[in-house]
Image: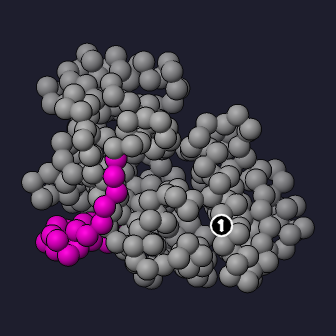
Amino acid sequence: MKILVLHSEVPADGPPEDQDTLIAAEAVRAALVRKGNTVSKAAFRADTLAALLNEQAPEMVFNLVEGVDGKGILASAAPRLLSQLGMAFSGVRAEAMDFTCDKPQTKAKLRAAGLATPDWSTPPDWTGLDERAFIVKAALEDGSIGLDDDCVVTGAAAIKARAEDCFRRFGGAWFAEEYVEGREFNLSLLGNLQSLHILPMAEMTFADWPTDKPRIVGYGAKWDEGSSGYRHTVRRFGVENEEPALAAKLKAACEGVWKLFDLTGFVRVDFRVRASQPSILEINPNPGIAPDAGFAAAAQEAGMTYDDLIEAIVKAAA
Protein backbone atom coordinates (compact mmCIF):
# COMPACT_ATOMS: atom_id res chain seq x y z
CA MET A 1 0.00 0.00 0.00
CA LYS A 2 0.90 3.63 -0.26
CA ILE A 3 0.69 4.99 3.28
CA LEU A 4 1.21 8.41 4.84
CA VAL A 5 2.37 8.45 8.48
CA LEU A 6 0.84 11.58 9.98
CA HIS A 7 2.19 12.86 13.29
CA SER A 8 1.97 15.87 15.58
CA GLU A 9 4.04 18.91 14.73
CA VAL A 10 6.66 18.98 17.48
CA PRO A 11 9.14 21.83 18.12
CA ALA A 12 12.81 20.95 18.55
CA ASP A 13 12.63 21.86 22.23
CA GLY A 14 9.34 20.06 22.85
CA PRO A 15 8.91 17.98 26.03
CA PRO A 16 9.78 14.27 26.03
CA GLU A 17 6.16 13.13 25.72
CA ASP A 18 5.92 15.10 22.46
CA GLN A 19 9.32 13.97 21.18
CA ASP A 20 8.12 10.41 21.69
CA THR A 21 5.60 11.01 18.90
CA LEU A 22 8.42 11.64 16.44
CA ILE A 23 10.25 8.51 17.61
CA ALA A 24 7.07 6.49 17.08
CA ALA A 25 6.43 8.02 13.66
CA GLU A 26 9.87 7.05 12.38
CA ALA A 27 9.56 3.55 13.86
CA VAL A 28 6.15 3.07 12.24
CA ARG A 29 7.45 4.36 8.90
CA ALA A 30 10.37 1.92 8.98
CA ALA A 31 8.13 -1.00 9.99
CA LEU A 32 5.71 -0.30 7.15
CA VAL A 33 8.55 -0.10 4.65
CA ARG A 34 9.89 -3.45 5.86
CA LYS A 35 6.43 -4.89 5.22
CA GLY A 36 6.68 -3.81 1.59
CA ASN A 37 4.67 -0.58 1.66
CA THR A 38 5.52 2.75 0.06
CA VAL A 39 5.58 5.19 2.95
CA SER A 40 5.90 8.95 3.45
CA LYS A 41 5.80 10.91 6.70
CA ALA A 42 4.54 14.40 7.54
CA ALA A 43 3.43 16.64 10.39
CA PHE A 44 -0.27 17.43 10.68
CA ARG A 45 -1.35 20.92 9.71
CA ALA A 46 -5.07 21.45 9.25
CA ASP A 47 -4.69 24.20 6.66
CA THR A 48 -2.44 22.16 4.35
CA LEU A 49 -3.71 18.60 4.90
CA ALA A 50 -5.93 18.52 1.81
CA ALA A 51 -3.06 19.69 -0.40
CA LEU A 52 -0.72 17.16 1.21
CA LEU A 53 -3.12 14.29 0.55
CA ASN A 54 -3.61 15.46 -3.03
CA GLU A 55 0.14 15.58 -3.56
CA GLN A 56 1.00 12.29 -1.81
CA ALA A 57 -2.13 10.38 -2.90
CA PRO A 58 -1.89 7.75 -0.13
CA GLU A 59 -4.31 4.85 0.08
CA MET A 60 -4.52 5.37 3.83
CA VAL A 61 -3.08 7.45 6.67
CA PHE A 62 -1.44 5.97 9.76
CA ASN A 63 -2.59 8.57 12.28
CA LEU A 64 -0.18 9.36 15.11
CA VAL A 65 -1.40 12.88 15.85
CA GLU A 66 -1.49 13.13 19.66
CA GLY A 67 -2.08 16.86 19.88
CA VAL A 68 -2.19 20.16 18.06
CA ASP A 69 -0.14 23.11 19.29
CA GLY A 70 0.89 20.97 22.26
CA LYS A 71 -2.72 20.36 23.36
CA GLY A 72 -3.90 16.77 23.49
CA ILE A 73 -7.56 17.78 23.58
CA LEU A 74 -7.17 19.02 19.98
CA ALA A 75 -5.91 15.67 18.68
CA SER A 76 -9.33 14.83 17.25
CA ALA A 77 -8.82 17.52 14.60
CA ALA A 78 -6.78 15.04 12.55
CA PRO A 79 -9.28 12.14 12.35
CA ARG A 80 -12.15 14.60 11.91
CA LEU A 81 -10.52 16.28 8.92
CA LEU A 82 -9.32 12.98 7.45
CA SER A 83 -12.88 11.67 7.64
CA GLN A 84 -14.25 14.81 6.00
CA LEU A 85 -11.73 14.41 3.20
CA GLY A 86 -12.78 10.79 2.65
CA MET A 87 -9.42 9.33 3.64
CA ALA A 88 -9.05 5.95 5.32
CA PHE A 89 -6.97 6.14 8.49
CA SER A 90 -5.87 4.11 11.49
CA GLY A 91 -6.93 4.69 15.07
CA VAL A 92 -10.10 5.90 16.74
CA ARG A 93 -12.69 8.12 15.10
CA ALA A 94 -12.89 11.80 16.02
CA GLU A 95 -16.03 11.41 18.14
CA ALA A 96 -14.51 8.65 20.25
CA MET A 97 -11.30 10.62 20.67
CA ASP A 98 -13.18 13.75 21.71
CA PHE A 99 -15.09 11.83 24.35
CA THR A 100 -12.30 9.74 25.82
CA CYS A 101 -9.84 12.65 25.95
CA ASP A 102 -12.17 14.28 28.49
CA LYS A 103 -11.55 12.19 31.61
CA PRO A 104 -14.45 13.38 33.81
CA GLN A 105 -16.86 13.02 30.88
CA THR A 106 -15.53 9.52 30.21
CA LYS A 107 -15.94 8.54 33.85
CA ALA A 108 -19.53 9.76 33.89
CA LYS A 109 -20.35 7.62 30.84
CA LEU A 110 -18.60 4.60 32.36
CA ARG A 111 -20.51 5.00 35.62
CA ALA A 112 -23.84 5.39 33.79
CA ALA A 113 -23.14 2.18 31.85
CA GLY A 114 -22.41 0.24 35.04
CA LEU A 115 -18.65 0.03 34.45
CA ALA A 116 -16.64 0.58 37.62
CA THR A 117 -14.51 3.71 37.89
CA PRO A 118 -13.21 5.49 41.00
CA ASP A 119 -15.21 8.38 42.44
CA TRP A 120 -14.26 11.85 41.22
CA SER A 121 -14.97 15.53 41.74
CA THR A 122 -14.75 18.52 39.41
CA PRO A 123 -14.63 22.29 39.89
CA PRO A 124 -16.17 24.68 40.58
CA ASP A 125 -18.51 22.82 42.94
CA TRP A 126 -16.08 20.04 43.96
CA THR A 127 -18.97 17.91 45.18
CA GLY A 128 -18.23 14.59 46.85
CA LEU A 129 -14.90 15.48 48.41
CA ASP A 130 -14.27 13.94 51.81
CA GLU A 131 -11.32 12.70 53.84
CA ARG A 132 -10.35 9.98 51.38
CA ALA A 133 -7.13 10.45 49.41
CA PHE A 134 -7.64 11.91 45.95
CA ILE A 135 -5.24 12.26 43.04
CA VAL A 136 -5.39 15.61 41.22
CA LYS A 137 -5.18 15.00 37.47
CA ALA A 138 -5.36 16.92 34.21
CA ALA A 139 -8.90 16.61 32.88
CA LEU A 140 -8.07 16.96 29.19
CA GLU A 141 -4.42 15.95 28.74
CA ASP A 142 -2.51 12.68 28.96
CA GLY A 143 1.18 11.83 29.32
CA SER A 144 0.90 11.99 33.14
CA ILE A 145 1.31 15.77 33.12
CA GLY A 146 1.42 17.05 36.72
CA LEU A 147 1.58 13.59 38.31
CA ASP A 148 4.39 13.74 40.87
CA ASP A 149 4.91 12.71 44.48
CA ASP A 150 2.63 15.53 45.69
CA CYS A 151 -0.38 14.87 43.45
CA VAL A 152 -2.15 12.60 45.99
CA VAL A 153 -3.76 14.78 48.66
CA THR A 154 -6.44 14.55 51.33
CA GLY A 155 -9.10 17.08 52.30
CA ALA A 156 -11.07 19.56 50.21
CA ALA A 157 -8.78 22.51 50.93
CA ALA A 158 -5.65 20.61 49.90
CA ILE A 159 -7.30 19.24 46.78
CA LYS A 160 -8.46 22.66 45.63
CA ALA A 161 -5.05 24.18 46.38
CA ARG A 162 -3.31 21.44 44.39
CA ALA A 163 -5.64 21.96 41.41
CA GLU A 164 -5.02 25.71 41.47
CA ASP A 165 -1.26 25.15 41.64
CA CYS A 166 -1.38 22.79 38.66
CA PHE A 167 -3.42 25.31 36.69
CA ARG A 168 -0.82 27.98 37.37
CA ARG A 169 2.04 25.68 36.33
CA PHE A 170 0.50 23.84 33.39
CA GLY A 171 -2.74 25.58 32.45
CA GLY A 172 -5.79 23.57 31.42
CA ALA A 173 -8.52 21.95 33.50
CA TRP A 174 -7.93 19.78 36.59
CA PHE A 175 -10.10 17.44 38.63
CA ALA A 176 -9.77 15.02 41.53
CA GLU A 177 -10.14 11.25 41.36
CA GLU A 178 -10.26 8.90 44.34
CA TYR A 179 -6.81 7.40 44.84
CA VAL A 180 -7.19 3.63 44.76
CA GLU A 181 -4.42 1.89 46.67
CA GLY A 182 -4.11 -1.30 44.67
CA ARG A 183 -2.61 -3.03 41.68
CA GLU A 184 -2.30 -1.28 38.32
CA PHE A 185 -2.98 -2.90 34.95
CA ASN A 186 -2.55 -1.44 31.46
CA LEU A 187 -4.45 -3.36 28.79
CA SER A 188 -3.66 -2.90 25.10
CA LEU A 189 -6.64 -3.25 22.77
CA LEU A 190 -6.55 -3.68 19.00
CA GLY A 191 -9.39 -3.98 16.51
CA ASN A 192 -12.29 -2.30 14.73
CA LEU A 193 -16.03 -1.95 15.18
CA GLN A 194 -16.53 -5.62 14.29
CA SER A 195 -13.80 -7.28 16.33
CA LEU A 196 -11.56 -6.74 19.34
CA HIS A 197 -8.23 -8.35 20.23
CA ILE A 198 -6.96 -7.89 23.77
CA LEU A 199 -3.19 -8.29 23.95
CA PRO A 200 -1.55 -9.98 26.98
CA MET A 201 -2.44 -8.10 30.13
CA ALA A 202 0.36 -6.01 31.63
CA GLU A 203 0.61 -5.26 35.33
CA MET A 204 2.79 -2.36 36.43
CA THR A 205 4.51 -3.35 39.66
CA PHE A 206 6.23 -1.00 42.07
CA ALA A 207 9.49 -2.71 43.01
CA ASP A 208 11.27 -1.63 46.22
CA TRP A 209 8.94 1.36 46.37
CA PRO A 210 9.41 3.90 49.20
CA THR A 211 6.58 3.68 51.72
CA ASP A 212 5.98 7.44 51.63
CA LYS A 213 5.75 7.63 47.82
CA PRO A 214 2.32 7.16 46.14
CA ARG A 215 2.15 4.09 43.94
CA ILE A 216 1.44 5.77 40.62
CA VAL A 217 3.05 5.72 37.20
CA GLY A 218 3.74 9.43 37.23
CA TYR A 219 5.46 11.78 34.83
CA GLY A 220 8.95 10.83 35.97
CA ALA A 221 8.21 7.12 35.74
CA LYS A 222 7.18 7.57 32.12
CA TRP A 223 9.66 10.11 30.81
CA ASP A 224 12.67 10.59 33.11
CA GLU A 225 15.08 7.66 32.85
CA GLY A 226 17.05 9.00 35.81
CA SER A 227 14.09 9.06 38.17
CA SER A 228 13.43 6.45 40.84
CA GLY A 229 9.91 6.01 39.44
CA TYR A 230 11.31 5.07 36.03
CA ARG A 231 13.71 2.55 37.54
CA HIS A 232 11.25 0.94 39.94
CA THR A 233 8.09 0.57 37.86
CA VAL A 234 8.37 -2.89 36.37
CA ARG A 235 5.98 -4.37 33.80
CA ARG A 236 5.03 -8.01 34.17
CA PHE A 237 2.66 -10.37 32.38
CA GLY A 238 0.88 -13.58 33.32
CA VAL A 239 -2.37 -12.70 35.10
CA GLU A 240 -4.39 -14.74 32.57
CA ASN A 241 -2.74 -17.95 33.79
CA GLU A 242 -2.12 -16.99 37.41
CA GLU A 243 -5.50 -15.39 38.20
CA PRO A 244 -8.01 -16.33 35.49
CA ALA A 245 -10.98 -14.94 37.43
CA LEU A 246 -9.39 -11.49 37.62
CA ALA A 247 -8.33 -11.69 33.97
CA ALA A 248 -11.93 -12.47 33.01
CA LYS A 249 -13.14 -9.35 34.83
CA LEU A 250 -10.53 -7.19 33.09
CA LYS A 251 -11.47 -8.69 29.73
CA ALA A 252 -15.18 -8.06 30.28
CA ALA A 253 -14.50 -4.44 31.24
CA CYS A 254 -12.42 -3.91 28.10
CA GLU A 255 -15.15 -5.39 25.93
CA GLY A 256 -17.67 -3.07 27.56
CA VAL A 257 -15.44 -0.03 27.01
CA TRP A 258 -14.81 -0.94 23.36
CA LYS A 259 -18.53 -1.13 22.60
CA LEU A 260 -19.57 1.81 24.76
CA PHE A 261 -17.27 4.29 23.03
CA ASP A 262 -17.29 2.73 19.53
CA LEU A 263 -13.53 2.34 19.64
CA THR A 264 -11.31 1.36 16.73
CA GLY A 265 -7.58 1.03 16.09
CA PHE A 266 -5.24 0.75 19.07
CA VAL A 267 -6.31 1.84 22.54
CA ARG A 268 -4.99 1.41 26.08
CA VAL A 269 -7.26 1.04 29.12
CA ASP A 270 -5.75 1.62 32.57
CA PHE A 271 -7.12 -0.09 35.67
CA ARG A 272 -6.63 -0.16 39.40
CA VAL A 273 -7.56 -3.40 41.15
CA ARG A 274 -8.52 -3.46 44.82
CA ALA A 275 -9.79 -6.62 46.51
CA SER A 276 -9.90 -8.37 43.09
CA GLN A 277 -12.28 -5.72 41.70
CA PRO A 278 -11.05 -3.71 38.69
CA SER A 279 -11.89 -0.02 38.32
CA ILE A 280 -11.25 1.85 35.08
CA LEU A 281 -8.97 4.85 35.52
CA GLU A 282 -8.61 6.12 31.97
CA ILE A 283 -9.06 5.25 28.32
CA ASN A 284 -6.16 6.36 26.15
CA PRO A 285 -7.30 6.62 22.49
CA ASN A 286 -3.79 7.35 21.17
CA PRO A 287 -1.32 5.48 23.39
CA GLY A 288 2.40 5.45 22.77
CA ILE A 289 3.30 3.11 19.94
CA ALA A 290 7.10 3.45 19.93
CA PRO A 291 9.07 0.18 20.04
CA ASP A 292 9.86 0.65 23.76
CA ALA A 293 6.28 1.50 24.77
CA GLY A 294 3.88 -0.71 26.68
CA PHE A 295 1.73 -1.46 23.63
CA ALA A 296 4.71 -2.93 21.77
CA ALA A 297 5.69 -4.90 24.89
CA ALA A 298 2.22 -6.46 25.04
CA ALA A 299 2.41 -7.34 21.35
CA GLN A 300 5.80 -8.96 21.87
CA GLU A 301 4.37 -10.99 24.75
CA ALA A 302 1.72 -12.19 22.28
CA GLY A 303 4.44 -13.37 19.91
CA MET A 304 4.13 -10.45 17.50
CA THR A 305 7.11 -8.57 16.15
CA TYR A 306 6.91 -4.79 16.08
CA ASP A 307 6.41 -4.94 12.32
CA ASP A 308 3.55 -7.42 12.78
CA LEU A 309 1.89 -5.05 15.27
CA ILE A 310 2.03 -2.09 12.91
CA GLU A 311 0.70 -4.23 10.06
CA ALA A 312 -2.17 -5.40 12.30
CA ILE A 313 -3.10 -1.78 13.03
CA VAL A 314 -3.18 -1.08 9.28
CA LYS A 315 -5.38 -4.13 8.66
CA ALA A 316 -7.77 -3.06 11.44
CA ALA A 317 -8.30 0.22 9.59
CA ALA A 318 -9.17 -1.49 6.31
Image position, residue 101 (x, y; %): 47, 49
* Quarter of the figure with the C terminus: bottom right
Task: Quadrant for residue 90, please give it.
Answer: bottom right
Q: Label 1, on which residue? A: 28
Quick check: can you spot residue 10? yes
Q: Residue at x 86, y 69 (%)?
A: 56
Relative to 165, say whether 97 is above or below: below
Image position, residue 270 (x, y; %): 34, 55
Instruction: State the residue in front, 104 or 298.
Output: 298
Relative to 284, say whether 71 is above or below: above
Image position, residue 89 (x, y; %): 65, 70
Is 246 contained in the magenta span? yes
Is 79 left, or right, of 39 in this rendering?
left
Q: Residue at x 45, y 72 (%)?
A: 299
Secondary structure under the numbered disc 1 in the rendered image? helix
Instruction: State the residue in front, 37 or 226.
Output: 226
Is 233 left, or right, of 173 in this rendering?
left
Q: Main secondary structure of the magenta part?
A: helix
Amino acid at pointer 1: Val
Is 260 left, or right, of 249 in this rendering?
right
Is 244 left, or right, of 229 in this rendering?
left
Q: Residue at x 38, y 23 (%)?
A: 163
**Magenta region:** 233-257
Q: How is the image coloured?
A: one colour
